[in-house]
Image: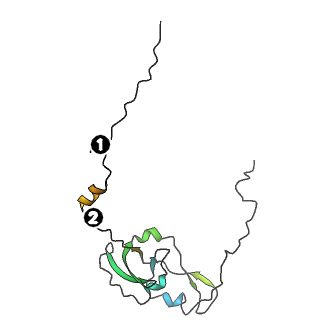
C-alpha cells in the first residue's frame, strides 16, 4: 500500500523567489571569524538594520537586562529597547559565510554566542481617571443586568 500524500516518489523543483539577487562574499571568511563572537540581532520588519550602523550601545553585564536605544528611523528619532534573548531560542539558526574572502561558495559559520531583539518603545500617555469617566457612556450608572435563563423542562402528563 503506497502513501500518495507523502511525496517521496516525486521531486519538487526549486524556483527562485521574485527579486532574488546572487551575492558575492565580501572580506569576511570563515577563517576570519575564528577569534570572534557572533551575535544575532532581530529588528522590526519596518526598520532597516542599517540604522544601527555606527550606534554605540553599552550592554549591561546582566544578560537578562535591557537597554534603551535611540535610533534615527527615516528622519525621526525613535526610542527602542534592546532585549537580550535566551540563545537556546536561536540554537538552530545557522549563519552562512564565504569559505574564503570574495568567494561565491558559502559554508555554515560558527554558532551565535548571544541574541538580541530590538523592540520599539511606545510611550502611552497617562490619562487622568476623570477623563476616562467623562468619556464613558452614561447609562444610569447601573451595571449591566444578567438575563435569566428560563427553564426548558418538559412536563409530562400521566
Residue of label 1: 143
Position of residue 48 measured from the top left corner of the image (x, y, whole percent)? 49, 81
Q: How many marks?
A: 2
Q: Residue at x 44, y 20 (%)?
A: 153
Tag 2 secondary structure: loop
Looking at the image, which is closer to me, 137 or 143? 137
Q: Is residue 139 left or right of residue 87?
A: left
Q: Residue at x 63, y 86 (%)?
A: 23
Looking at the image, which is closer to me, 50 or 63? 50
Looking at the image, which is closer to me, 149 or 79? 149
Position of residue 83 measured from the top left corner of the image (x, y, whole percent)? 37, 74
Q: Residue at x 36, y 88 (%)?
A: 56
Label 1 to label 2: alpha-carbon separation: 23 Å
Q: Is residue 55 above or below residue 147?
A: below
Q: Residues within 10 Å of mark 1 (few under 14, many from 20)?
A: few
Residue of label 2: 127
Tag 1 secondary structure: loop
Position of residue 4 measured from the top left corner of the image (x, y, whole percent)? 74, 52
Task: Report which quarter residue 15 is drawn in.
Answer: bottom right
Of the numbered discs 1 and 2, the one sitting upstream in the chain is 2
Q: Is residue 122 left or right of residue 101?
A: left
Q: Is residue 85 above or below residue 151?
A: below
Looking at the image, which is closer to me, 109 or 124? 124
Q: Which mark is residue 31?
A: none
Amino acid at each position: 500500500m503506497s502513501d500518495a500524500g507523502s511525496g517521496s516518489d516525486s521531486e519538487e523543483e526549486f524556483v527562485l523567489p521574485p527579486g532574488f539577487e546572487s551575492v558575492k562574499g565580501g572580506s569576511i571568511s570563515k577563517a576570519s571569524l575564528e577569534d570572534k563572537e557572533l551575535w544575532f540581532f532581530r529588528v522590526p520588519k519596518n526598520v532597516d538594520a542599517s540604522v544601527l550602523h555606527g550606534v554605540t550601545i553599552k550592554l549591561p553585564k546582566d544578560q537578562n537586562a535591557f537597554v534603551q536605544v535611540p535610533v534615527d528611523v527615516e528622519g525621526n528619532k525613535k526610542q527602542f529597547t534592546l532585549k537580550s534573548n535566551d540563545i537556546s531560542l536561536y540554537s538552530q539558526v545557522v549563519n552562512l559565510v564565504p569559505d574564503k574572502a570574495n568567494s561565491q561558495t558559502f559554508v555554515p559559520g560558527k554558532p551565535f554566542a548571544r541574541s538580541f531583539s530590538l523592540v520599539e518603545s511606545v510611550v502611552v500617555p497617562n490619562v487622568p481617571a476623570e477623563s476616562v469617566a467623562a468619556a464613558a457612556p452614561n447609562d444610569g450608572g447601573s451595571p449591566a443586568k444578567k438575563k435569566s435563563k428560563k427553564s426548558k423542562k418538559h412536563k409530562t402528563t400521566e
